[in-house]
């Protein structure tokens, strides 16, 4: 049995116990995670490349900022119909082909939960999911920093397109392509790393969708977390337009977007390590959403004031720290509350609903704006009177509070996958059972049945 301990055969704890049960973690799981992360990062870079300089782009091409916003919206719109296809590909065809065919955001952004379930032992799943999920915001970070740095004036736009999109932006995608074709030959490991992986995708695709439609906890999570995705997508795409009206430069908006993502990654890392150790998914996500709502309200108010650079930078940092932190936890929680439905369906449909809500929220926020006579302090450059975003930002904050309240009041679930793993490993039942419950849950934790 010595060869079954995976990457660290001498380690104590869950890895050694899993090895004694015949499970194995392969070193190449990290290569797979790197490929998914690179693809997601590259895709996000392209998605948000024009948003940080939307007003300058609009002026250069003689378009309105509403038309430029569709360069970001089209990602969300396209992911709604193709998201269902991506879910089927992940659960029925496999991870490797989903990576090679990653021509759209859907196939990549749904993959971390599936990858973590199939390739990583139970004590590393949340961390692996966090790394894969947070690679998407890292791409947004590059776009928020690079686009304003390259486009100082209208004449710089061709330089941005040539040097960034045809150069820097293609590097992660090219590296991922080489790694995927040269190093990855299978969608699942020969020996599963955990009992949950051994039973992954045990339900057929359509049967899994039916089970999800009847799962109250999953529906509440999908609606609330999907709304959070929509709010964050709108925030990222509209940040520059909201701030320029009150005299903030594109460079400062890009800095706020960068802080939003950097602190978001740090928050996700801290929370991912915490839930990997404690398995308190429900309590972590409820607290995170409540704190996110408070910061969102603060942004809605302070963003309408002038000269508040320090306050806005701090608010954007906290918004990312609390908000992004719950994303990988929600992916794991979706799998836990819906097991034995396939991980691709459980996590993917969260994002499909999130993209649909994102389209509606972004269109609603834009529709509530009104043109106002350009004040002397405005830095917007689209050639039209700037938009007043006050009502839109208050609505965004109200929606964030609403989704958080619904989650706190109505979401309760057993951790079905963890319980199934404990039932499949009676020799370690005593070690794993305490982790399958959460102080905030008020329901018993039955085996993996819906």
Image (cartoon, rainbow, N blue to C red):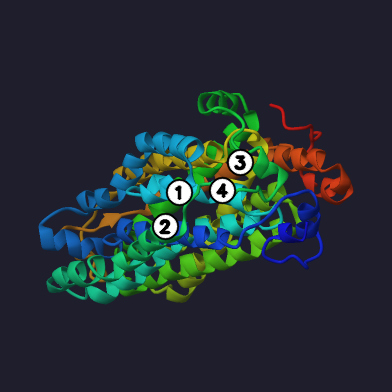
CA distance separating discs 1 and 2:
8 Å
| N-terminal-most mark, 2 or 4 | 4
Q: Residues within 10 Å of mark 1 (few under 14, many from 20)?
A: many
Position of residue 276 in the picture relative to residue 140 (left or right): right
CA distance separating discs 2 and 4:
18 Å
Name the front one of labels 2 and 4: 2
Position of residue 297 in the picture relative to residue 360 (left or right): right
Residue position marked by numbered label 2 in the rendering: 180
| N-terminal-most mark, 2 or 3 | 2
Residue position marked by numbered label 3 in the rendering: 334
Q: Say whether residue 39 is visible.
A: no
Residue position marked by numbered label 4 in the rendering: 113
| N-terminal-most mark, 1 or 4 | 1
Q: Nearer the viewer, residue 279 or 250?
A: 279
- Residue 386's tag is none
- Residue 96's tag is 1
Name the front one of labels 2 and 3: 2
Looking at the picture, how far across and down is residue 442, in whole percent? 79, 37
Give the secondary structure at mark 2: helix
Q: Which image quarter is the N terminus in?
A: bottom right
Answer whether labels 1 and 3 touch (C-beta < 8 Å): no
Answer whether labels 3 and 4 touch (C-beta < 8 Å): yes
Looking at the picture, how far across and down is residue 260, in whole percent? 47, 65
Residue 198: name its quadrant: top right
Query: Which residue is rendered at x = 75% and y = 49% of the image?
Result: 22
Q: Nearer the viewer, residue 92 or 106?
A: 92
Query: Which residue is rendered at x = 56% and y = 23% of the image?
Result: 207
Give the secondary structure at mark 3: helix
């Amino acid at each position: 049995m010595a060869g079954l301990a995976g990457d660290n055969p001498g380690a104590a704890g869950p890895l050694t116990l899993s090895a004694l049960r015949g499970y194995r973690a392969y070193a190449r799981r990290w290569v797979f995670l790197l490929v998914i992360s690179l693809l997601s990062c590259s895709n996000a870079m392209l998605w948000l490349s024009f948003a940080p300089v939307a007003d300058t782009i609009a002026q250069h091409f003689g378009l309105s900022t509403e038309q430029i916003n569709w360069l970001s919206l089209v990602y969300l719109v396209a992911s709604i119909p193709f998201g269902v296809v991506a879910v089927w590909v992940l659960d029925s065809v496999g991870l490797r082909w989903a990576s090679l065919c990653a021509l759209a955001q859907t196939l990549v952004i749904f993959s971390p939960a599936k990858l973590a379930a199939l390739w990583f032992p139970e004590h590393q799943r949340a961390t692996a999911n966090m790394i894969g999920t947070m690679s998407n915001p890292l791409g947004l970070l590059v776009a928020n920093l690079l686009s304003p740095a390259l486009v100082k004036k209208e004449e710089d736009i061709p330089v941005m397109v040539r040097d960034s999109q045809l150069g820097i932006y293609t590097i992660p995608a090219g590296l991922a392509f080489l790694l995927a074709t040269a190093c990855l030959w299978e969608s699942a490991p020969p020996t599963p790393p955990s009992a949950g992986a051994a039973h992954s995708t045990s339900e057929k695709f359509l049967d899994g969708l039916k089970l999800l439609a009847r799962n109250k906890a999953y529906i509440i999570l999908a609606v609330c977390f999907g709304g959070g995705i929509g709010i964050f997508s709108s925030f990222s795409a509209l940040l520059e337009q909201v701030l320029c009206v009150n005299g903030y430069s594109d460079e400062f908006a890009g800095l706020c977007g960068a802080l939003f993502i950097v602190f978001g990654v740090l928050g996700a890392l801290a929370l991912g390590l915490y839930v990997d150790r404690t398995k308190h998914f429900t309590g972590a996500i409820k607290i995170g959403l409540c704190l996110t709502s408070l910061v969102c309200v603060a942004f809605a108010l302070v963003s309408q004031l002038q000269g508040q650079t320090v306050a806005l930078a701090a608010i954007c940092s906290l918004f990312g720290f609390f908000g992004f932190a719950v994303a990988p936890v929600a992916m794991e929680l979706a799998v836990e509350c819906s097991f034995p439905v396939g991980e691709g369906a459980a996590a993917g449909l969260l994002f499909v609903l999130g993209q649909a809500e994102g389209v509606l929220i972004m269109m609603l926020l834009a529709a509530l704006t009104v043109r106002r006579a350009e004040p002397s302090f405005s830095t917007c450059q689209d050639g039209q009177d700037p938009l007043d975003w006050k009502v839109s930002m208050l609505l965004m904050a109200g929606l964030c509070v609403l989704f958080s309240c619904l989650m706190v009041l109505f979401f309760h679930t057993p951790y079905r996958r963890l319980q199934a793993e404990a039932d499949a490993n009676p020799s370690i039942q005593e070690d794993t059972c305490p982790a399958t419950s959460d102080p905030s849950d008020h329901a018993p934790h039955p085996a993996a049945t819906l």
